Image (spheres, coloured by chain):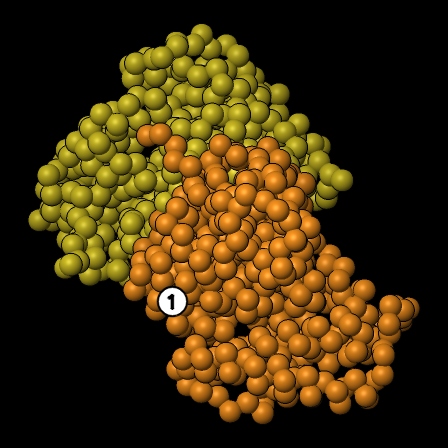
Chain colours: A orange, B yellow
Amino acid sequence: MPRRIKKVAILGSTGSIGQQTLDIIRALNTRFQIVGLAAGTNTELLARQIDEFQPRLFSCSAEPDFGCAAQFLPMEGMVTDPEVDLVVIATSGKSGLYPLLAAVRAGKTVALANKETLVMAGEIILREARQHRAKILPIDSEHSAVWQCLRGERTRIERIFLTASGGPFYHFSPARLEQVTAQEALQHPVWKMGRKVTIDSATLMNKGLEMIEAHWLFAVPFDNIEVLLHPQCIVHSMVEFADGCVKAQLGFPDMRLPIQYAICYPERLSNTELPRLDLHMVQALNFQSVDEARFPCLTLARNAARMGGTYPAVLCAADEVAVELFLSHRTRFVDIARIVEETLEEHRAVARPTLDAILQADAWARKRANQISLRYAEAHPRPHKGTPVNDPGIAK
Amino acid sequence: MPRRIKKVAILGSTGSIGQQTLDIIRALNTRFQIVGLAAGTNTELLARQIDEFQPRLFSCSAEPDFGCAAQFLPMEGMVTDPEVDLVVIATSGKSGLYPLLAAVRAGKTVALANKETLVMAGEIILREARQHRAKILPIDSEHSAVWQCLRGERTRIERIFLTASGGPFYHFSPARLEQVTAQEALQHPVWKMGRKVTIDSATLMNKGLEMIEAHWLFAVPFDNIEVLLHPQCIVHSMVEFADGCVKAQLGFPDMRLPIQYAICYPERLSNTELPRLDLHMVQALNFQSVDEARFPCLTLARNAARMGGTYPAVLCAADEVAVELFLSHRTRFVDIARIVEETLEEHRAVARPTLDAILQADAWARKRANQISLRYAEAHPRPHKGTPVNDPGIAK
């Protein structure tokens, strides 16, 4: 059988996942052809990518200030182009929502890194995907692990165990958590990721969003999705089956591995540029339950997921606002959960919402979270702007 | 689709694996029907099993001294009976060899626990299985783990990591190993197994035999099969793929789990009698490389495997003799490896042997290993008969 070249469109090509996807495609260049590249405002890097990969189509949110042979097209147009086999959605926040829906309605195979889209509108997206026989393949390392464990399995999943690094502050006391700076929070102990997801990892909100994503991707009830702290980030997640057998996927913690798995699926290709786990050096893999009293974002996400409707969209939007305010030194790390919680409490949800209702809830939540955070900003003006505090204050 | 009842013959029904297979079938009794039961000399237990499961056929090596409606038939006749869907081979040593070959030549599906058959005659058995489209499904927990990790995978295996408990003496110094008693060696820290395999676990010969078994079952070169000590016995083995991803199977260390997986395959059935792993309680999974200087049986097995021909059969036979002599207090624990090594050194191998040549090598090795061990028995007459020594002498 002659190898077929996959024709790929990448949304968010200048972000962390987008760049790593291009690294894989560069290494496996006989297998892929780039048809379209879409970026936000980083037109300088986009221009270099266009120069290297020569896509037929491109997209960016800023006015393109470079001359090139590629044709400018909005993301929705790019992903539905008949030539495209695989759409990689590596945008963040809600920006991937419309392009994802367009790709799904066109019956495309989508490799998805932009988890907020599923958190906000999982029910709608999955319904459209079923209807149009589109496939959604996860890029997130945890969901990639679950998906790999499910290969060839026919029976229902008993439980999913999502692993969490715990982020840089897992052993911090409540008092010490109040003093965390943006600079500290951006230092993830293991994974190299974008800014938003790095902060979400530190609050464990990221694991809450992943729980909702897993629910939609694998059709597993929220109560059957558990979180285990695993500081080494080597076991990327586990699945328990009806017979009590558990399968786990392990690997060197490098996002290029799950990216490659998603874009090469169903093949597994050798790529000498990727690091390999040396199991003789691993020595210990540790696991423990999460202390949700100190990391309430996981509880907030679980509750929003159970209530459903527009609550998960509000969770996402309020978190995005709260993380941005923390990163711009206007509120504190511990305020992120409080701002999200207050926004959720004030929300009047719509059950089984339309996409419009979801986007209205998103807009309301952004506005309301900004208002709520003013109070937190005033209570602790310009806290810890880049001045880490030296109180070790380790919990237990 | 109406559920089809699997019709099963069990060889070795009174042994440890045989009894546990019947435990599973008792718990899932709407799915299975016992067509035949075969035992060795334990006719008392066999009579009770026949009374409970009402097989049409039975077999035993001793003269049956009980009256029952079942028909006596040699094992080769039982496994080829047209009604039999699944043959469980839970015999030990070479006793399963002819029945396995008969089952394979009849195109049956075989759940195999008797690893020595594959060690002795893997090439012949696999060739016949391919020719007659028979399936061999592993029962050993390590091979079950590898097999589960391979479900749905299409690409070649990069490496297999067989996990090993290390047995009860893994931290013993060479001096302390010389004083190990049979009583001590029969206390496996985790697994409840038969006597022979418990001693093989303590010498790590069991892992060597499993390496050879894995080579034949999964068509992986010996050099790509590695052993990792994992004292908790929760990760039952791992597989590394071409892309660097690793999959592992985990479970409570109870042989009924892999037995159930093999006999229910491709289904995974819920069985409330089986223990479940509580991943929140696991805390740590440890791994380390094997110190083959203190546990030379693994090296002996690897070398016999690489040399091929009749060497693996000689390894098996000499080990069986040496373990029996140790269990009857005639030689020491450390003599097992030495007796096996000397027997292997004296062997004149046949390359690509016939079954006859393999059985001749087996007979030669048993005789020679017995002669060699006389020297060891004389050097240390009646060593440590049931009197454990109190020298802690822990290595490192």
Quick check: B174 left or right of A134? Answer: right
Residue occupying the point 48% across, 88% down: A349
Q: Quadrant of the N terminus of chain B?
A: bottom left
Residue A121 image point, x, y percent: 45, 73
Q: Nearer the viewer, residue A282 or B191?
A: A282
The relative height of residue A288 versus residue B66 in the rendered view (above or below) is below
Location of residue A202 (image quadrant): bottom right
Residue A46 image point, x, y percent: 63, 49
Q: Quadrant of the C terminus of chain B?
A: top right
Q: Look at the image and tell me whether residue A152 can be seen.
A: yes
Residue occupying the point 48% across, 39% down: A33
Residue A273 image point, x, y percent: 62, 35
Quick check: B191 left or right of B139? Answer: right
The residue indicated by pointer 1 is A126
Q: Nearer the viewer, residue A32 or B88?
A: A32
Residue occupying the point 48% across, 15% down: B307
Q: Nearer the viewer, residue A237 or B38?
A: A237
Residue occupying the point 67% across, 55% down: A42
